[in-house]
Image (cartoon, helix red, strand yellow):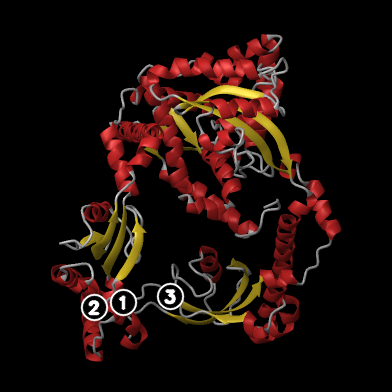
Amino acid sequence: MIKLLSRMERTRSLIIIGFALLMGVSLVLFYAPGRGGSVTPAALAREVVARVGREEITVGDLNAVKQIYSQMFGGPLGLLQLGGDKRILDGLIRDRVIAQEAARLGLAPSDAEVADAIRRQFTDASGKFIGFERYKETVVARYGSVENFERQMRNAVAEEKLRAFVTAGVQVSEEDVLDTFKRRNTKFDLIYVPVTVDKLAQKIQPSEDELRAFYEEHKTDFRILEPQKKIRYIYIDQEKVGQRIKISDDELRAEYEKLSPENKQAGVRVQQIVLRVARPELDSTVREKADALVSKLRGPDGKASEEAFAEAARGNSEDPATARAGGYLPRPVRRNPNKPDDPLQRTLDAEEGQVIGPIKYGNAYYIFRRGAAVPKTFEEAKRELEVSLRNRKSYDAAAKLADRAVALLKETKDVQRVAQELAPEANMSPQEMVRETPYVKPGDDVPNIGVNPQFEETIAPLNEVGDVGNRVGVRGGFAIPMLADKRDPRIPDFAEVRDKVLDRVRRERARQQLEQVAREIADGAQKPEDLRTLAEKHGLQAQTSSNYTLGTPITDVGTSAAADEAIYALQAGQVTKNPIKVSDSLVVVGVTKRTEADLAEFAKQRDTLMEEALAERRAQIFNDYVEQARARMEREGKIKIYDDVLKRAAEFDQSLSRLIEFGKPEERLV
């Protein structure tokens, strides 16, 4: 890559020197805390968490992706929703599998191909490469290092080549596309009876003797293996503390002035022309048309007027929605570091009026025109700024108040007295501040707190009644816990677990009745209207759904391929002969009205539907191919995940999270 990029500058030696300096600095910055990136120690960051063939994936590589996701999805909670470290690591392994599979088949991208892809992404108004220094500055700011970005680009080009190779012969028939159209657009009016364990259990009323007998037979199932603690705690609501904080316009204006120029924008307006490649053999023809349009639109300065581009979009673009609007996308384009290969991201580095493209992406060529930046005025940003600033200030104020509560509670051991003293500052009543948990153990869903590892760790050292823990973040604020009582591991008596015994007996009996009840309803229904009476007979309720389409979840049941097949086979007035299994439930369905798909609409959309079906089929084939390639590499021992390193990295993140207190708002605009 250095050799290729050297053609873009005055001398090769200057590039090599600059590149060497860049790599040295980027290694320092990449692992340096306080730069908005990972704060993992350098030694841990260099540890190998997985190997794919001869390639290593380090903790630093993992953290680089985590940082991007954290910024996009709101911190650690967003990462958990995405599946955590293991899910992100799977993505990194997939990238390496694709790159190595491409190499195995002789499809590895050359340096020239990668450099060409980079040059096309980083062009100035005249269509020329922006130069190494500006390129370096841009990618280091966005991706941490030139090396990291170029590896991503190389993998992206490899994936594009492998995808093209694997899916070259994929076809879809018009018959299959028409069948899919019919299935997606045929509508049904339904009467159905959900037969669920929960519903049947509600009607089961075992006697006390039956419950006691079940308990005696299964009492070890209810054994409590860990100590249980009852915690009395002071709760400080961050929002209520924040309500007392006054924020002036001067403070908000100061916050606004601190924003980067990019955060003072709502995005940039972009016009586009889309030219679709209906069949692979038409690619060169479509490319020629795209090149001709760009040559016509692009002036000597590489730019086009808004009106000229709009006219070209209306006359040529094959995306009807944007073509009607002169090519304009409905929303401003904003930077998304998670999509380095998204062609729209290139418009953000262009000048206003610049024409970018043609760019091949998926099954189409795109031509873009960068429009004006959409500013975000102080008044438009004011609400976000106020929320962000109030959140930070209320957090700090609540944290300080919680620290005072810790000191007072350790001194007095009197929760009520401390709450009484601090209530005015907390903007709460003493009754609101004093809370108590039931007897809990690790992993329990604690009322008002939930399953909270930080809370569990805070109360773990509390072993004597009256022991006080440090403040800990909980839902909406802070808790200052004090041990109120403790119970050792034991088999609880019947009274203590009666509700659990009742629930267990009800659910076990309901499972035994499930299929029989559903079968009686299906057998007894000659027409859809019969389902109402049969449902009532078993203490259930028939429900209705109008204009139902396949794949839509059925209320109280969900959906499944089996449900889709059974419903699609029904005509008006018919009922499913057999109950349909959906997850752990059964459902009996009747159709009162069936409206067939409009075939005239299919004729209008045929070309688009064929193209979408082909793209969907290609994606499915490619994903299956990659999964098979990974499975083969795993069988050959070419993929190794070091769970101990992954665990250490996770433990470090948890330790860091405790230090900065989980849930502390980031000091940035929302």
Look at the image and tell me in which quarter the N terminus lies: top right
Badge 2 or badge 3: first in the primary sequence: 2
Give amino acid for label 1.
Answer: Phe
User: Which numbered mark, 2 or 3, is in the foreground of this view?
Assistant: 2
Given residues 173 and 217, the one toward you in this image is 173
Residue located at (54% from left, 44% from top): 66
Residue located at (48% from left, 19% from top): 286
Mark 2 lies on a secondary structure that is helix
Q: Is residue 160 above or below residue 240?
A: above
User: Which numbered mark, 1 or 3, is in the foreground of this view?
Assistant: 1
Q: Is residue 210 left or right of residue 188?
A: left
- Spot the residue most to the left: 523
Q: Is residue 153 left or right of residue 387?
A: left
CB under 8 Å between callouts 1 and 3? Answer: no
Dot label at residue 222? 1
Residue corresponding to mark 2: 218
Give amino acid for label 3.
Answer: Pro
Residue corresponding to mark 3: 227
Q: Is residue 308 above or below residue 552?
A: above
Q: Is residue 591 above or below residue 39?
A: below
Given residues 465 and 386, the one toward you in this image is 386
Give amino acid for label 2.
Answer: His
